[in-house]
Image (spheres, rainbow, N blue to C red):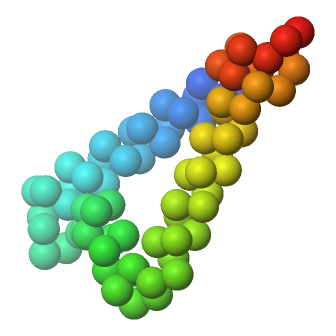
Amino acid sequence: MNTPWIIGTLAAIAFFAIWEWAAFKWPKRFNTLSHFVATIGATWPLSIWLMGLFAGILAAHFFWPWCGNPLGQGAG
């Protein structure tokens, strides 16, 4: 059933939108996602590589031509 994934995706979008809005409205109180990534990358440079690794693994998972994957055109 797709309902939990739809709800989770909408919740993630809402979370992002709320905190980005707050960061633009009160820039001294909250950081944008970009500023957070830059700050954590300056403190711990390996974190940027790990975020890229995570994004790459997700991309391979979504587009790899495994059997039954409609995005990867897998046979099935």
Q: Quadrant of residue 8?
A: top right
Quadrant where the C terminus lies? top right
Percent across and percent down for residue 10 are: 49, 31
**Residue 33 or 50: which is nearer the viewer?**
50
Percent across and percent down for residue 26 are: 12, 64
Q: Is residue 3 visible?
A: no
Residue 44, relative to residue 57: is it above or below? below
Percent across and percent down for residue 21 are: 20, 49
Residue 51, relative to residue 75: is it above or below? below
Quadrant where the N terminus lies? top right
**Residue 53 or 34: which is nearer the viewer?**
53
At 85% from the left and 12% from the top, the residue drawn is 75
Q: Is residue 9 visible?
A: yes
In-image side of 22 versus 37 (left or right): left
At 36% from the left and 70% from the top, the residue drawn is 37
At 34% from the left and 86% from the top, the residue drawn is 42
Residue 53, relative to residue 4: is it above or below? below
In-image side of 58 versus 11 (left or right): right
Q: Quadrant of residue 41?
A: bottom left
